[in-house]
Amino acid sequence: DVQLQASGGGLVQAGGSLRLSCAASGDTLDDYGIAWFRQAPGKEREGISCIYTSANSGTYYADSVKGRFTISRDDAKNTVSLQVDSLQPEDTAVYYCAADRYRRNSDDVADYTYWGQGTQVTVSS
């Protein structure tokens, strides 16, 4: 089984940037679709970005982050990153990465088997 470790969160001012990372162990991510979700207090977990397998690497972005967030794979490091730019207070949430073998760009929580522990992103106004 693959284990995921999310990192890179922090406290930033509005307009700032962070780079979130999802590092994998136990298996290579080549054949996994990877997604980033976020969950704000009192809200449901929201799928915001996905990337397909190494052979395809098609991507998906939710409308709420399109143009500001960029997902990418680094197969040599067995890592998927999410560059988050132009952050706004409404982006404040715990960000999670998730993986499922051959999962193609789904934003449904139920479609992912493996989850990282989450990293907190807080954006001040």
Image (tube, rainbow, N blue to C red):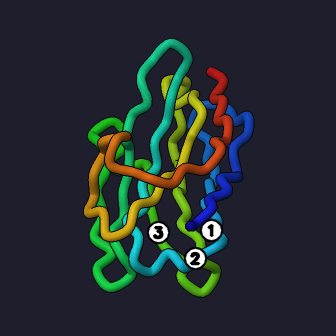
Please tell me the numbered disc located at residue 24. Answer: 1
Q: Is residue 92 left or right of residue 62?
A: right
Badge 3 is on which residue?
Answer: 72
Query: Residue furthest toward the front?
Result: 1
Please tell me the numbered disc located at residue 66. Answer: none
> Local crowd at mark 3 within 10 Å, few (<14), some, or many (≥20)?
some
Name which quarter of the figure residue 76 lies in. bottom right
Residue 7: give x, y in percent of width and height: 70, 52
* Quadrant of the snapshot with the C terminus: top right
Q: CA distance from mark 1 to mark 3?
A: 14 Å
Provide the secondary structure element on which disc 3 rests: strand
Q: Nearer the viewer, mark 2 or mark 3?
A: 2
> Local crowd at mark 1 within 10 Å, few (<14), some, or many (≥20)?
some
Q: Residue at x 39, y 81 (%)?
A: 54
Q: Nearer the viewer, mark 1 or mark 3?
A: 1
- The disc labelled 1 sits on which kind of residue? Ala
- The disc labelled 3 sits on which kind of residue? Ser
Q: Residue at x 53, y 82 (%)?
A: 75
Residue 28: give x, y in percent of width and height: 54, 79
Do labels 1 and 2 touch, CB within 8 Å?
Answer: yes
Q: Residue at x 56, y 40 (%)?
A: 95
Name which quarter of the figure residue 104 lies in. bottom left
In the displayed structure, would residue 56 be above or below residue 112? Answer: below
* Quadrant of the snapshot with the N terminus: bottom right
Do labels 1 and 3 touch, CB within 8 Å?
Answer: no
Residue nearest the observer in this picture, 20 or 97:
97
Query: In the rendered structure, which disc, 2 or 3, sits on the residue that comes first in sequence?
Result: 2
Name which quarter of the figure residue 83 lies in. bottom right
Q: Is residue 68 left or right of residue 5?
A: left
Badge 2 is on which residue?
Answer: 27
> Local crowd at mark 2 within 10 Å, few (<14), some, or many (≥20)?
few
